[in-house]
Image (cartoon, grey):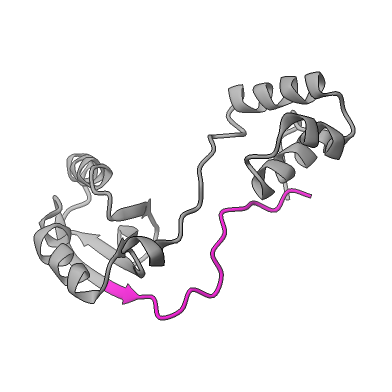
Amino acid sequence: MTLTADLDRTDLKILACLQEDGRISNLKLAETVSLSPTAVLARVQRLTREGFILGYEARLNPNKLGAGLMVFVEVLLDRTTPHVFEAFKAAVQVRQEILECHMVAGGFDYLLKTRMADMAAYRQFAGTVLWQLPGVRETRTYAVMEEVKSSARLALL
């Protein structure tokens, strides 16, 4: 694993602790990494300022909030021009059902991660939103039957 030279072992420990518990108190974090609270706060502020920490958010249970069906969608555009790419990206940004959108190399242009209440809701989304996105020529849908592993944590140590 290649990391930037700007991070020392203590920075990595801080990042690992924050990945584990983003609500950890500064005092507890300081105890965990064996630094003073003031020193830890300064490091966290620097890591945030330098873009290593992007923000904090709660992980919600989609099954309890009416978004139990996860669907991945391959999207092939009709043309791969800068204008079509920009229009597609702008349209995707405003759709809350689309959790992630990745431009990929290979047999299609974008991979979307979506969440819906159920298959009927996905069908509605596909007809009224997905197939109406700018430049969409073809889609392939993969409904998730079982979520085996789900994590946003990076391997740091």
Q: Residue at x 33, y 75 (%)?
A: 142
Q: Residue at x 9, y 60 (%)?
A: 128
Relative horizontal placement of residue 120, taking residue 155 as reference (left or right): left
Q: Residue at x 26, y 62 (%)?
A: 75
Residue 99 spot, x, y in % from top left = 36, 53
Residue 73 spot, x, y in % from top left = 30, 66
- Residue 116 lies in what quarter of the image? bottom left
- Is 146 situated above or below 17? below
Q: Is residue 143 magenta?
A: yes
- Is 19 situated above or below 119? above
Taking depth in this image into account, of 74 and 114 the one nearest to the observer is 114
Magenta span of residues: 141-157
Residue 131 appears in view:
yes
Taking depth in this image into account, of 103 and 157 the one nearest to the observer is 157
Q: Residue at x 63, y 40 (%)?
A: 23
Q: Main secondary structure of the magenta part?
A: loop
Residue 29 spot, x, y in % from top left = 78, 35
How many callouts does the rendering have? 0
Taking depth in this image into account, of 2 and 142 the one nearest to the observer is 142
- Is 39 situated above or below 18? above
Most distant residue in the right direction: 34
